[in-house]
Image (cartoon, grey):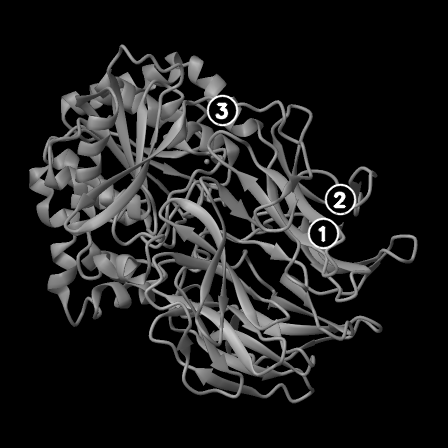
């Protein structure tokens, strides 16, 4: 239940254009609500200066992945392309260059053209790069032959750069990885997939008799010499992640039976035989979520990250190891006051991991035998090699690395070098400047916890003035706000470009301060975490010239829930926008597509302990609401389904509270259509302008 700054991201047509389904108050609601809707429409039309802010959000060239070669001498990255108008056109391309060469980056393939707009489930046109062990070949996925259908390709760098297609399948391919002997490429394969994997994308509409229908993502092996393609994991098993054993005979896999979107929360760690029989053995059943399996160089152990995680792509926890034959798992980072997001072994048997510390990105190394942790680097920025969280691509010896680096003041670029000593490789965004003010990390205490958050100053800040402030609570709750260049649809950062302070706290339940902090909101949603937020508001008021009578509240996913919750608990906020929120945990349990996430946070199912769900449901306290609230959601959201937003809006309009509901067509939990992203920004800014200026 999340949304970080889409970085995915982390990541929308409007009433004026008639492309969105809009439920407003013109047909059924108090007279003042009908007037509110008309005022918002006028504000949207009138906020032409906002277009410059929105354009700046769309101006940055972004990167989906970067990967350094095993020998540390070359780097590849996946870049999102732009059209003639300078806006992203839906295509991606792979670039390759030597780190010790003066040659310019070269396109790996130029076969892909046209637009991806008509492709409903394809996340990219070219991407998912993977180096061969000898650094002489590059595997990647591309839909060069048939738009919308990815196939596996290999580029041979030693053979005049020739490119060969290895597969001819129907379905979704993802995450290729070479075997250590260089003879085989493993890939995740969903046969006849109707959409991309994961709960963040738009759900496929269901009609007729509704039954459990699973599209299992299986592990397939492709012989590099012959192109022979065979699925090796069981047909009833969904595989999420994997890693090869050093001798290329087995794979460590994280997998579960049944629904892939839901059952990630109960997945086990297995070993899978790469031979013809494909025998699979469960070696660990975790109490919480696990991710990032990595086989040790000597083949004796498998490392992974385990902890309380609220969303499949958002990995965070402690680093564990377990014997490759099975047995007891060992936490090698107990009591760590940070959250591990990714890991990789070094030849010496140490584990390098990317981490979140408060709101910062960092990297460290732990000796798996002694448990000694040494810090390698920490910075007030966002560092990734592709997946969410602090993620670093390492060379085989661990001495060189590649990252995509950004902050709230610097747009993303690819960097490479030793950890903490990177040099800039790309300069795609040299002319792009932030359309918002400075970001400052602030700290405060509450209930015995040390809390951190980001205060983003308004554009053209004048210290002699007092400004309104919008509080944006992040999604998750397993996540953390970091200083990261915003995604194109970031409605909160657009507010900072429109004359507002924007405050983004990391309350208890967030990543960044260890597992005890992350688990501190279990069975307590809306209580301790919201007190942390309010205490942070007080600190922001002491820190900067903010008008306490002009405060707003917003958020998406868990932040949408916290917005709905917040307006039932206090009248301190004069306006709110709840995005993809949760109004009623009791009804939500039976509506969402990933109910397994709720057990670790609530202790039991809603059928066994309805009271704990009711006490954290905004609808329980709905009659307290006085705050004008805009409600926004996608019509195909499986994580936070549309009825939750409808229920909250319906209650507010029935009680005479100023409100408006906007539902966007064929958008899931992550809005992907640029026109919808732009409209969401305009509506949000117009709503707060109307009530706080």
Instruction: Give yes or no for contact between labels 2 and 1 (Cβ–Cβ under 8 Å).
Output: yes
Q: Residue at x 54, y 23 (%)?
A: 433
> Which secondary structure, mark 2?
loop
**Would you say 65 lies left or right of 678 here?**
right
Residue at numbered disc 1: 143
Q: Height in image: 350 above or below 500?
A: below
- Point out the residue furthest to the top here: 464
Is 537 on the left or on the right of 387, as rendered?
Answer: left
Residue pictured at 57% horizontal, 54% vertical:
392
Image position, residue 336 (x, y; %): 36, 62
Could you tell me how far apart the alpha carbons at marks 1 and 3 are, in whole angstroms?
34 Å
Question: In this rendering, is residue 306 above or below 442?
Answer: below
Q: CA distance from mark 2 to mark 3?
A: 31 Å
Residue 112 is labelled as: 2
Give the mark nearest the N terminus, 2 or 1. 2
Q: Which mark is residue 434?
A: 3
User: Residue 380 at what x, y percent from top left?
Assistant: 44, 40
Q: Residue furthest left?
A: 623
* Residue 659 appears in the figure: no
Q: Nearer the viewer, mark 2 or mark 3?
A: 3
Provide the secondary structure element on which disc 3 rests. loop
Q: Secondary structure at mark 1?
A: strand
Cβ atoms at labels 2 and 3 below 8 Å apart: no
Chain-order first, disc 1 or disc 3? 1
- Is there a contact, CB below 8 Å, between mark 1 and mark 3? no
For the residue pair 484 and 678, the one nearer the viewer reads as 484
Quadrant into which the C terminus falls = top left
| Residue 672 location (% of width, % of height) | 50, 41
| Mark sitting earlier along the chain (2/3) | 2
Q: Position of residue 466 (x, y in %)?
A: 24, 15
Whether residue 73 is visible? yes
Residue 234, placed above or below residue 102: below
């Amino acid at each position: 239940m999340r949304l970080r700054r889409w970085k995915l991201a982390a990541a929308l047509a409007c009433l004026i254009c008639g492309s969105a389904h809009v439920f407003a108050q013109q047909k059924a609601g108090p007279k003042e609500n009908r007037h509110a809707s008309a005022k918002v429409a006028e504000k949207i039309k009138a906020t032409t200066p906002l277009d410059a802010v929105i354009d700046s959000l769309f101006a940055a060239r972004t990167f989906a992945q970067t990967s350094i070669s095993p020998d540390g001498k070359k780097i590849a990255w996946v870049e999102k392309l732009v059209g003639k108008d300078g806006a992203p056109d839906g295509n991606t391309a792979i670039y390759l260059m030597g780190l010790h060469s003066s040659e310019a980056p070269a396109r790996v393939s130029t076969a892909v053209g046209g637009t991806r707009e008509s492709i409903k489930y394809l996340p990219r046109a070219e991407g998912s790069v993977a180096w061969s062990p000898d650094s002489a070949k590059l595997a990647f996925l591309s839909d060069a032959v048939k738009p919308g259908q990815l196939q596996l390709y290999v580029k041979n760098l030693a053979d005049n750069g020739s490119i060969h297609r290895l597969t001819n399948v129907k379905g979704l391919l993802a995450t290729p990885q070479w075997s250590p002997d260089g003879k085989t490429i493993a890939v995740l394969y969903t046969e006849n997939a109707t959409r991309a994997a994961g709960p963040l994308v738009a759900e496929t509409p269901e009609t007729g008799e509704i039954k459990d229908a699973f599209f299992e993502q299986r592990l397939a092996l492709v012989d590099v010499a012959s192109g022979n393609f065979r699925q090796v994991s069981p047909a009833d098993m969904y595989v999420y992640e994997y890693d090869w054993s050093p001798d290329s005979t087995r794979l460590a896999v994280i997998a579960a039976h049944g629904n892939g979107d839901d059952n990630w929360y109960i997945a086990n760690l297995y070993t899978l035989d790469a031979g013809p029989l494909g025998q699979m053995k469960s070696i660990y059943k975790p109490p919480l979520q696990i991710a990032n399996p990595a086989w040790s160089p000597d083949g004796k152990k498998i490392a992974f990250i385990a902890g309380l995680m609220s969303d499949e792509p958002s990995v965070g926890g402690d680093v564990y190891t377990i014997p490759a034959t099975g047995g007891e798992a060992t936490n090698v980072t107990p009591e760590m006051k940070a959250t591990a997001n990714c890991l990789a072994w070094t030849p010496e048997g140490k584990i390098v991991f990317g981490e979140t510390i408060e709101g910062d990105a960092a990297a460290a190394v732990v000796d798996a035998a002694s448990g000694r942790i040494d810090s390698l680097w920490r910075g007030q920025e966002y560092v990734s090699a592709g997946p969410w969280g602090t993620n670093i691509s390492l060379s085989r010896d661990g001495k060189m690395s590649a990252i995509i680096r950004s902050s709230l003041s610097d747009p993303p670029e690819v960097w490479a070098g030793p950890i903490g000593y990177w040099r800039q490789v790309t300069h795609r965004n040299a002319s792009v400047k932030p359309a918002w003010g400075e970001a400052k990390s602030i700290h405060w205490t509450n209930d015995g916890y040390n809390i951190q958050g980001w205060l983003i100053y308004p554009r053209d800040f004048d210290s002699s003035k007092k400004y309104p402030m919008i509080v944006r609570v992040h999604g998750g709750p397993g996540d953390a706000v970091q200083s990261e260049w915003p995604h194109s649809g970031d409605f909160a950062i657009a507010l900072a470009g429109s004359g507002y302070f924007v405050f983004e706290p990391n309350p208890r339940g967030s990543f960044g301060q260890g597992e005890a902090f992350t688990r501190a909101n279990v069975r307590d949603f809306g209580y301790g975490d919201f007190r942390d937020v309010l205490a942070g508001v007080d600190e922001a008021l002491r820190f900067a010239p903010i008008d306490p009578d002009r405060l707003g509240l917003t958020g998406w996913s868990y932040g949408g829930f916290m917005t709905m919750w917040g307006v039932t608990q206090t009248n301190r906020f004069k306006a709110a926008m709840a995005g993809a929120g949760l109004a009623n945990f009791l009804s939500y349990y039976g509506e969402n597509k990933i109910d397994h996430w709720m057990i670790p946070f609530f202790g039991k199912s809603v059928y066994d302990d309805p009271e704990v769900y009711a006490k954290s449901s905004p609808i329980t306290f709905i009659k307290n609401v006085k705050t004008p609230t805009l409600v926004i959601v996608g019509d195909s959201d499986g994580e936070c389904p549309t009825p939750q937003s409808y229920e909250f809006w319906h209650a507010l309009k029935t009680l005479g509270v100023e409100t408006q509901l906007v539902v966007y067509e064929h958008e899931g939990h992550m809005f992907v259509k640029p026109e919808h992203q732009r409209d969401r920004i305009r509506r949000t800014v117009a709503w707060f302008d109307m009530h706080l200026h």
